[in-house]
Image (tube, rainbow, N blue to C red):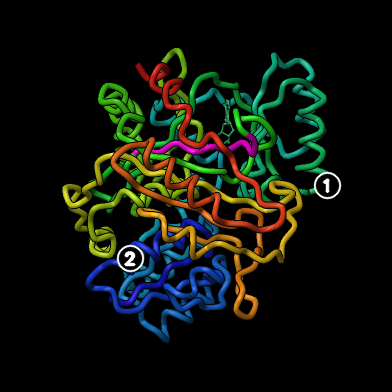
Amino acid sequence: MNVLVVGGGGREHALVWKLRQSPRMEKIWCAPGNGGIAPDAECVEIDAGNVAGLVAFAEKNLPDLTVVGPELPLVNGIADAFHARHWAIVGPSKQAAQLEGSKIFAKQFLRRQGIPTARMLETFDSAEQAASALRSAAWPVVLKADGLCGGKGVLVAQNLEEACDFLERAMVKNEFGAGAKRILLEEALEGEELSFILVTDGKGYAPLAPTRDHKRVFDGNRGPNTGGMGAYSTDELLPQPLRKTLVSTIVEPTLRGLASDGIPYQGFLYIGVMLTKTGPKVLEFNCRLGDPETQAIVARMDFDLAEVLADVAAGSLEPAKLRWKKGASACLVLASGGYPGKSVVGKQIDGLTAAKQITGVTVLHAGTKRRGEAMVTSGGRVLSVTAAAPSLEGTLQSVYQAAAKIRFEGMHYRRDVGRQIDSLKAAGN
Ligand code: AMP
């Protein structure tokens, strides 16, 4: 099998790493990939969002299967372009990807289907009108850019000043790009957050191993939000009663609702949920796997990913094939100085070989590139140190032992990944 993986971060390295283990794997391309993916796949210089470029590449190289990591190519219609040519691809259509590409589309869908979610207050396409409506608001209020903003498009505002500052940056200074032309306001929910990630072929679905991520940059959930500083997985994260509630009130109504709306959905679906006092409510949909959750999920896979994804693309998913290693996994993100603000890059990375020698540890690359014989940093989130072991404690020990071997100037990481399991259990029970 020859496979094209679209994207170039830690999530895509995790996919490549697992696909590579399949006995049926011959060649993997990764577009655009990164310096650390290069030993595992042939990196192709095409941006992930460049659908025409990816179509031209596939036309020439004929991959048996294409797996899409990030949201941008999906929202740009890569699945439609590939389906029109009868090429196998894992990922939803442009219309289905609107669940992530437009928060207003997602909200209207949830409302139509009667699926629990935060109440939408109003939508605006002018900062002035939004600000004037907010003068009489009861705080906190959540402001969300309608379109894709690379993770910057949401603010839980505590007061008018914060809200106006966000509106100014989003809609006047256009700091978040075209995705922030429209803004929606919604009710703020309180509770513990949880994500439920599944894969579906449009008919059946299989949940992936439950994970939890750490979004804030500093220990104890302090500091600004990031793309994710780490994630971990254990079955305890999703006790059976909570799983049942999520499946019956959110997961299955969502899949049924998409089908009844005539929006077939194939690929990964990430459902962000808040466990509120009045039950679980949807915060957001993502039309793809999360990063760094994927690294933790892949570490627990005890099945042939290439086979299962080929089944998904062919519409013949067999959920029983997805078997998970018992125990736990974790992924610790090593970030550059300055991240999540402006990151200092171009720093030499040492200790990778020593880190990889620790049993059960894989070092996945996100922001790295080769400079001669050396590996140097090239982005904010640099490496995902990932491990699986029979216990969460053992997993964390391996991950932190490996991280201690790695060095680059300015490197920082959280020391408390995997440490908040109790609060979530309490919220879910
Ligand atoms: P989203 O991209 O919609 O998930 O928003 C990013 C983050 O903002 C979520 O992970 C939550 O932490 C927070 N958030 C989003 N919507 C709400 C809400 N209605 N109430 C409270 N927090 C929210």
Q: Vertically, is 145 above or below 118?
A: below
Residue 252 lies in the magenta-colored region: no
Q: Considering the numbered disc 1 on the image, is that residue within a helix, a strand or a loop?
A: loop
Q: Is residue 307 visible?
A: yes
Instruction: Work out whether residue 170 or residue 412 is closer to the camera in this orientation and state it.
Output: 412
Give x and y (percent) for residue 258.
35, 42
- Does label 2 point to a residue whose CB lies under 8 Å from ligand 1? no
Instruction: Work out whether residue 211 or residue 150 is closer to the camera in this orientation and state it.
Output: 211
Q: Is residue 346 left or right of residue 5?
A: right
User: For mark 2, what is the residue?
Assistant: 19
- Magenta stretch bounds: 210-218
Instruction: Work out whether residue 279 or residue 17 is closer to the camera in this orientation and state it.
Output: 17
Label disc, if present, on residue 173 of the rendered structure: 1
Label disc, if present, on residue 406 of the rendered structure: none
Give x and y (percent) for residue 59.
41, 83
Which residue: 29% across, 25% down? Answer: 239
Q: Vertically, is 129 above or below 361?
A: above
Which residue: 71% across, 57% down? Answer: 409
Real-space Cα distance between discs 2 and 1?
42 Å
Picture quadrant where residue 279 is located: top left
Give x and y (percent) for residue 385.
48, 52
Give x and y (percent) for residue 158.
72, 21
Q: Which three-letter amino acid code belongs to the residue tagged 1?
A: Lys
Q: Is residue 282 left or right of residue 21?
A: right
Q: Is the stretch drawn in magenta largely helix, strand or loop?
A: strand
Give yes or no for contact between labels 2 and 1 (Cβ–Cβ under 8 Å). Answer: no
Give the quadrant of the C terminus.
Answer: top left
State which image quarter holds ligand 1: top right
Q: Which three-letter amino acid code belongs to the residue tagged 2?
A: Leu
Which residue: 64% across, 35% down? Answer: 218
Picture quadrant where residue 366 is located: bottom right
Which residue: 66% across, 51% down? Answer: 411
